[in-house]
Image (cartoon, rainbow, N blue to C red):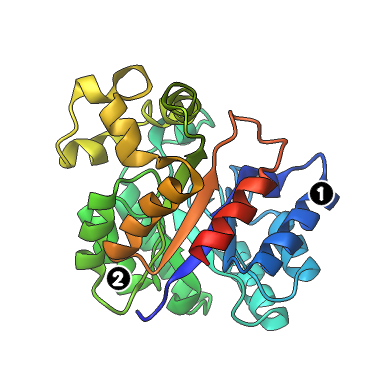
């Protein structure tokens, strides 16, 4: 696809405590030229109202859940939300769907079995509800889910993946599907503090089998996955350093085949603060 879009993936945009500040941040990101706002839909039912609030409060920027869990949401309600958003804001809402992770699903009392089959049946239900494939993407990691993204959606939104995965995903999707990986970054030139910030983020994800199994496919070992990740793994997953060094790490994903990169600026796990300066600086380099 002939695109090179820089987007934002940031938990702050779903801040329930300060919706006005989240909208102010969205408006600035729109003016800076970012293409889309991504943030987690959480594990409530269907699509949270916050996505619609940001669509209504901005003018051009896209909005996308990354992700709506297929175990916690109704296909009919999700399809209706997407149809309403498309009617009122044409081309600006992109539905992100994912099979989530066994520990997160099972702690809610849901039996996590056959996630691929569950996704297929969910997509069947969205088809029956009339939701076009062009309005949805899948949070795909492994080869089968990437192929399903190619065949049943507009493309893929991988999360917590190295550049090598971006190249593999592009090969699996072909040239005409959207590939929009999330890439977390740390704007900090000090190796010690940058890696510490990165590990606050990686430690939780390295406890989830879907992510660790995916990384093992690319040759990462148990030693790399322990303790929040080896230095080598942290650097493969999380571009860090000066703004120019971070931008160079993001560029590698474009070179590997990404159409859109959703940047998540890590700020020590403080979801209640918006790292505005980092997004301003990166916009000046990347957009």
In this view, 38 is above or below 223: below
- Tell me: residue 282, above or below residue 242: below
Judging depth in this view, the residue of 48 and 276 nearest the camera is 276
Q: Does dot 1 land on a helix, a strand or a loop?
A: helix
Where residue 129 appears, x then y in whole percent?
A: 53, 75
Is 253 or 174 nearer to us in this picture?
253
Q: Distance between the residues labelled 2 and 1?
A: 37 Å
Residue 245 lies, in percent from the top left, at: 41, 46
Tell which residue pokes out farthest to the left in this image.
Answer: 219
Residue 274 at x, y percent in the picture:
70, 43
Question: Which residue of the protein is positioned furthest toward the top in this rendering?
Answer: 227
Looking at the rendering, which quadrant does residue 60 occupy? Answer: bottom right
Residue on which the image places disc 2? 150
Q: Residue 99 carries which label?
A: none
Mark in front: 2 vs 1:
1
Q: Can residue 46 be seen in this view?
A: no
Residue nearest the observer in this picture, 271 or 214: 271
Q: In the image, 166: left or right of 22?
A: left
On the image, numbered disc 1 is attached to which residue?
Answer: 21
Going by the image, does 4 lie left or right of 161?
Answer: right
Q: Is mark 2 on a helix, strand or loop?
A: helix
Point 50% across, 47% down: residue: 243
Of mark 2 and mark 1, the one earlier in the sequence is 1
x then y, percent, for residue 255: 29, 64
Q: For mark 1, does the 10 Å Cα neighbourhood hold few (<14), some (14 to 19), or many (20 or more) residues?
A: some
User: Which quarter shows the N terminus?
Assistant: bottom left
Is 96 left or right of 81, judged from the image as shown?
left
Label 2: few (<14), some (14–19) or many (≥20) C-alpha neighbours in 10 Å: many
The image shows residue 216, relative to residue 89, as above or below, that is: above
């Amino acid at each position: 696809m002939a695109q090179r879009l820089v987007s934002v993936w940031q938990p702050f945009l779903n801040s329930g405590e300060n919706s006005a500040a989240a909208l102010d941040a969205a408006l600035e990101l729109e003016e800076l030229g970012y293409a889309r706002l991504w943030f987690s839909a959480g594990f409530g039912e269907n699509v949270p109202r916050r996505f619609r609030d940001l669509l209504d409060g901005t003018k051009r920027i896209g909005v996308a859940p990354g992700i709506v869990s297929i175990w916690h949401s109704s296909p009919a309600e999700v399809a209706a939300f997407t149809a309403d958003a498309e009617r009122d804001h044409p081309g600006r809402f992109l539905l992100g769907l994912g099979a989530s992770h066994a520990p997160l699903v099972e702690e809610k009392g849901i039996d996590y079995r056959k996630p691929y089959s569950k996704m297929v049946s969910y997509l069947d239900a969205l088809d029956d509800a009339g939701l076009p494939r062009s309005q949805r993407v899948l949070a795909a990691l492994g080869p089968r889910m990437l192929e399903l993204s190619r065949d049943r959606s507009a493309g893929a939104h991988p999360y917590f993946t190295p550049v090598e995965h971006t190249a593999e995903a592009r090969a699996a999707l072909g040239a005409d599907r959207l590939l929009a990986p999330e890439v977390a970054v740390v704007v900090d030139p000090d190796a010690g503090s940058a890696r510490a910030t990165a590990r606050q983020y990686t430690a939780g994800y390295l406890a989830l089998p879907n992510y660790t199994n995916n990384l093992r496919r690319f040759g990462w070992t148990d030693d790399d996955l322990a303790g929040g990740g080896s230095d080598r793994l942290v650097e493969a997953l999380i571009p860090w350093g000066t703004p120019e060094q971070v931008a160079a790490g993001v560029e590698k994903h474009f070179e590997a085949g990404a159409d859109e990169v959703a940047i998540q600026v890590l700020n020590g796990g403080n979801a209640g603060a918006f790292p505005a300066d980092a997004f301003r600086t990166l916009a000046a380099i990347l957009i």
